[in-house]
Image (cartoon, grey):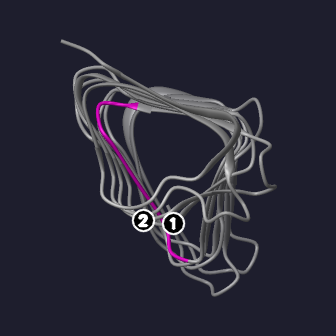
Amino acid sequence: IDASAAAGINLGDMDGAKDLTLSATNAAGVISLDNADIASLTIDDAHDVTFDGDFVTSGAVSVTGVDGEIAVNTGDSIQAGGAVTLTTSDTLDIDGAISGDSIALTGTTALQLAGNVTGDNGLVNFLSALTVDGNSIVSSTFGDVTFASTILDSLNDTHTLIVNADNGTATFTGAVGDGVTDLNSLTVTAGDTLFSSTVDVGTGGLTVTGVG
């Protein structure tokens, strides 16, 4: 489905074993999605994309070409049988849940997390600086979890982050906390845990548990 009007694309509930490709080419084009159970989703152009229901696919979910906000709202979810890729040059705001075979998340201006992100088999990769604005859990059942940049709290010493990679490696490339907007606590359970920079957390402390 291609839409060139500013109104964009607003889809209600969908069901069917078909692939869906959406493009909202207008500079103000918005794509809104409710509940779905389909084969796969590809979005290659939009200003904003909102997941406002439980969006289930047997295959991949790929959202790219977005220059505004991608939002997974509170109580809503993306549940993919394949890989999940969410990429925007602006803000990626995850207040619900995301699960998939592997997960790659990019919000160049802001990447905000107040929910759960779960990879079934592959890498869970946060490719942008992360702000935790709600208690969150990030897990990969049989793969690695990687944070490519910094991790901060939206309000100092307020929110918790739990990271699980029991059969893989949890990698923290950037600084965790900055002494001003630190997580309340960081809890990591992984086969291996790698910190490449400083770690500052609040009153909840840092807990790292090795598996294997």
Looking at the image, which residue is at 64% across and 87% down?
Answer: 27
109, 31: nearer the viewer: 109
Q: Main secondary structure of the magenta part?
A: strand
Instruction: Confirm whether the magenta stretch covers residue 101.
Output: yes
65, 129: nearer the viewer: 129
Placement of 17 over or under 193, stated as above or below: above
Residue 205, how many percent across, how many down? Answer: 62, 34
User: Which disc number belongs to residue 149?
Assistant: 2
Q: Is residue 95 visible?
A: yes
Which residue lies under the disc numbered 1?
Answer: 129
Placement of 72 over or under 111, stated as above or below: above
Looking at the image, which residue is at 76% across and 72% down?
Answer: 7
For the residue marked with disc 2, what is the amino acid? Answer: Ser
Residue at the top extreme, as displayed: 212
User: Which disc number belongs to residue 26?
Assistant: none
Magenta residues (range): 100-108
User: Which type of secondary structure does the marked residue at label 1 adopt?
Assistant: loop
